[in-house]
Amino acid sequence: MPTIFLTRPGYEKLQQELEYLRTVKRAEMAARLHEAIDGDYSDIDMDAEIINARHDQAFLEGRIVELERLLSNPVIKDKNCYEGAVDIGATVTIKEGGLEPEVYTIVGPAEASPSEGLISHESPLGSALMNRCPGDSVTVKCPDGSFTVCILKVE
Protein backbone atom coordinates (compact mmCIF):
# COMPACT_ATOMS: atom_id res chain seq x y z
CA MET A 1 0.00 0.00 0.00
CA PRO A 2 1.49 3.38 -0.97
CA THR A 3 2.37 5.88 1.72
CA ILE A 4 -0.35 8.46 2.30
CA PHE A 5 1.07 11.91 3.08
CA LEU A 6 -1.22 14.43 4.76
CA THR A 7 -0.69 17.80 6.35
CA ARG A 8 -2.13 18.28 9.84
CA PRO A 9 -4.99 20.52 8.54
CA GLY A 10 -5.69 18.05 5.72
CA TYR A 11 -5.80 15.14 8.16
CA GLU A 12 -8.22 17.00 10.43
CA LYS A 13 -10.42 18.03 7.50
CA LEU A 14 -10.66 14.44 6.25
CA GLN A 15 -11.44 13.19 9.77
CA GLN A 16 -14.25 15.74 10.07
CA GLU A 17 -15.64 14.68 6.69
CA LEU A 18 -15.54 11.02 7.74
CA GLU A 19 -17.36 11.74 10.99
CA TYR A 20 -20.00 13.79 9.14
CA LEU A 21 -20.55 11.04 6.58
CA ARG A 22 -20.77 8.32 9.23
CA THR A 23 -23.27 10.19 11.37
CA VAL A 24 -25.29 12.82 9.53
CA LYS A 25 -25.19 11.56 5.93
CA ARG A 26 -25.74 7.89 6.81
CA ALA A 27 -28.81 8.85 8.86
CA GLU A 28 -30.12 11.01 6.01
CA MET A 29 -29.51 8.19 3.54
CA ALA A 30 -31.31 5.65 5.77
CA ALA A 31 -34.33 7.97 5.99
CA ARG A 32 -34.29 8.49 2.23
CA LEU A 33 -34.16 4.74 1.55
CA HIS A 34 -36.93 4.09 4.07
CA GLU A 35 -39.10 6.75 2.41
CA ALA A 36 -38.38 5.38 -1.06
CA ILE A 37 -39.30 1.83 -0.05
CA ASP A 38 -42.42 2.85 1.88
CA GLY A 39 -43.46 5.65 -0.49
CA ASP A 40 -46.75 5.74 -2.35
CA TYR A 41 -45.42 5.84 -5.91
CA SER A 42 -46.43 4.19 -9.10
CA ASP A 43 -44.28 1.11 -9.72
CA ILE A 44 -42.00 2.95 -12.15
CA ASP A 45 -41.42 5.95 -9.85
CA MET A 46 -40.83 3.71 -6.84
CA ASP A 47 -38.29 1.61 -8.67
CA ALA A 48 -36.48 4.69 -9.96
CA GLU A 49 -36.37 6.33 -6.50
CA ILE A 50 -35.13 3.15 -4.84
CA ILE A 51 -32.47 2.66 -7.52
CA ASN A 52 -31.31 6.28 -7.18
CA ALA A 53 -31.24 6.08 -3.37
CA ARG A 54 -29.25 2.82 -3.47
CA HIS A 55 -26.83 4.33 -5.99
CA ASP A 56 -26.28 7.35 -3.73
CA GLN A 57 -25.88 5.05 -0.73
CA ALA A 58 -23.20 3.06 -2.56
CA PHE A 59 -21.38 6.29 -3.41
CA LEU A 60 -21.58 7.41 0.24
CA GLU A 61 -20.27 4.08 1.53
CA GLY A 62 -17.50 4.14 -1.07
CA ARG A 63 -16.37 7.57 0.12
CA ILE A 64 -16.43 6.37 3.74
CA VAL A 65 -14.25 3.36 2.85
CA GLU A 66 -11.86 5.64 0.92
CA LEU A 67 -11.55 8.04 3.86
CA GLU A 68 -11.03 5.16 6.30
CA ARG A 69 -8.22 3.87 4.07
CA LEU A 70 -6.60 7.31 3.80
CA LEU A 71 -6.80 7.89 7.54
CA SER A 72 -5.76 4.38 8.62
CA ASN A 73 -2.00 4.98 8.65
CA PRO A 74 -1.01 8.32 7.10
CA VAL A 75 2.30 10.09 7.46
CA ILE A 76 1.45 13.49 8.95
CA LYS A 77 3.75 16.21 7.64
CA ASP A 78 3.87 19.25 9.88
CA LYS A 79 5.42 22.50 8.66
CA ASN A 80 8.50 21.92 10.77
CA CYS A 81 9.38 18.75 8.83
CA TYR A 82 11.47 20.65 6.28
CA GLU A 83 14.41 22.98 6.68
CA GLY A 84 14.16 25.80 4.14
CA ALA A 85 13.54 23.45 1.22
CA VAL A 86 10.17 22.64 -0.32
CA ASP A 87 8.50 19.63 1.28
CA ILE A 88 4.96 18.48 1.94
CA GLY A 89 3.33 21.04 4.21
CA ALA A 90 5.43 23.94 2.94
CA THR A 91 3.86 27.09 1.54
CA VAL A 92 5.79 28.20 -1.53
CA THR A 93 5.74 31.55 -3.32
CA ILE A 94 6.80 31.26 -6.97
CA LYS A 95 7.01 33.61 -9.92
CA GLU A 96 6.90 32.77 -13.60
CA GLY A 97 8.45 35.37 -15.90
CA GLY A 98 6.66 38.72 -15.74
CA LEU A 99 3.54 37.28 -14.09
CA GLU A 100 2.37 38.00 -10.57
CA PRO A 101 3.76 35.75 -7.80
CA GLU A 102 1.63 32.74 -6.91
CA VAL A 103 1.40 31.00 -3.55
CA TYR A 104 0.83 27.26 -3.16
CA THR A 105 0.88 24.80 -0.29
CA ILE A 106 2.40 21.43 -1.13
CA VAL A 107 0.19 18.55 0.03
CA GLY A 108 -0.35 14.86 -0.63
CA PRO A 109 -2.69 13.85 -3.47
CA ALA A 110 -5.56 13.07 -1.06
CA GLU A 111 -5.94 16.71 -0.08
CA ALA A 112 -4.91 18.46 -3.31
CA SER A 113 -7.23 21.24 -4.46
CA PRO A 114 -5.50 23.54 -6.97
CA SER A 115 -8.36 26.05 -6.88
CA GLU A 116 -7.61 26.49 -3.15
CA GLY A 117 -3.86 26.74 -3.70
CA LEU A 118 -3.19 23.17 -2.52
CA ILE A 119 -1.07 21.24 -5.01
CA SER A 120 0.06 17.65 -4.81
CA HIS A 121 3.73 16.84 -4.45
CA GLU A 122 3.08 14.36 -7.29
CA SER A 123 1.80 17.00 -9.74
CA PRO A 124 4.20 18.37 -12.36
CA LEU A 125 4.63 21.65 -10.48
CA GLY A 126 4.73 20.07 -7.04
CA SER A 127 7.29 17.42 -7.97
CA ALA A 128 9.50 20.02 -9.68
CA LEU A 129 9.47 22.17 -6.53
CA MET A 130 10.21 19.37 -4.04
CA ASN A 131 13.50 19.75 -2.14
CA ARG A 132 14.30 23.07 -3.86
CA CYS A 133 15.12 26.29 -2.00
CA PRO A 134 14.36 30.02 -2.33
CA GLY A 135 16.28 31.52 -5.24
CA ASP A 136 16.20 28.29 -7.27
CA SER A 137 14.83 28.38 -10.80
CA VAL A 138 12.87 25.27 -11.62
CA THR A 139 11.76 23.93 -14.98
CA VAL A 140 8.33 22.32 -14.81
CA LYS A 141 7.62 19.69 -17.46
CA CYS A 142 3.97 19.32 -18.44
CA PRO A 143 2.25 17.27 -21.12
CA ASP A 144 1.91 20.35 -23.33
CA GLY A 145 5.44 21.70 -22.83
CA SER A 146 7.45 23.21 -20.03
CA PHE A 147 7.84 26.48 -18.15
CA THR A 148 10.28 27.90 -15.61
CA VAL A 149 9.45 29.37 -12.23
CA CYS A 150 11.63 31.00 -9.59
CA ILE A 151 11.08 30.11 -5.95
CA LEU A 152 10.77 33.35 -4.01
CA LYS A 153 9.90 32.07 -0.54
CA VAL A 154 9.37 28.80 1.34
CA GLU A 155 7.49 28.85 4.65
Image: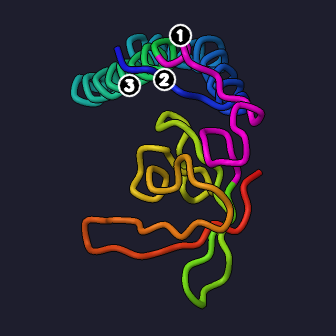
Q: Is residue 132 visible?
A: yes
In-front residue for pair 106/56: 106
First along the sequence among labels 1 and 3: 3
Q: Which residue lies at the image location 68% right of the left edge and 76% below the top edge?
A: 101
- Residue identified by numbered label 3: 59
Instruction: Say if the magenta span includes residue 9.
Output: no
In the drawing, does residue 40 fall left or right of residue 151? left
- Residue identified by numbered label 2: 4
Q: Nearer the viewer, mark 2 or mark 3?
A: 2
Quarter assignment of residue 27? top right
Q: Is residue 39 visible?
A: no
Q: Where's residue 20, x and y in %?
A: 66, 20
Q: Are marks 2 and 1 in contact (CB under 8 Å)?
A: yes
In-front residue for pair 110/66: 110
Q: Where's residue 35, x and y in %?
A: 48, 16
Residue at the far bottom in the pictured view: 98
**44 in relation to 66, above or below:** below
In the drawing, does residue 104 fall left or right of residue 112? right
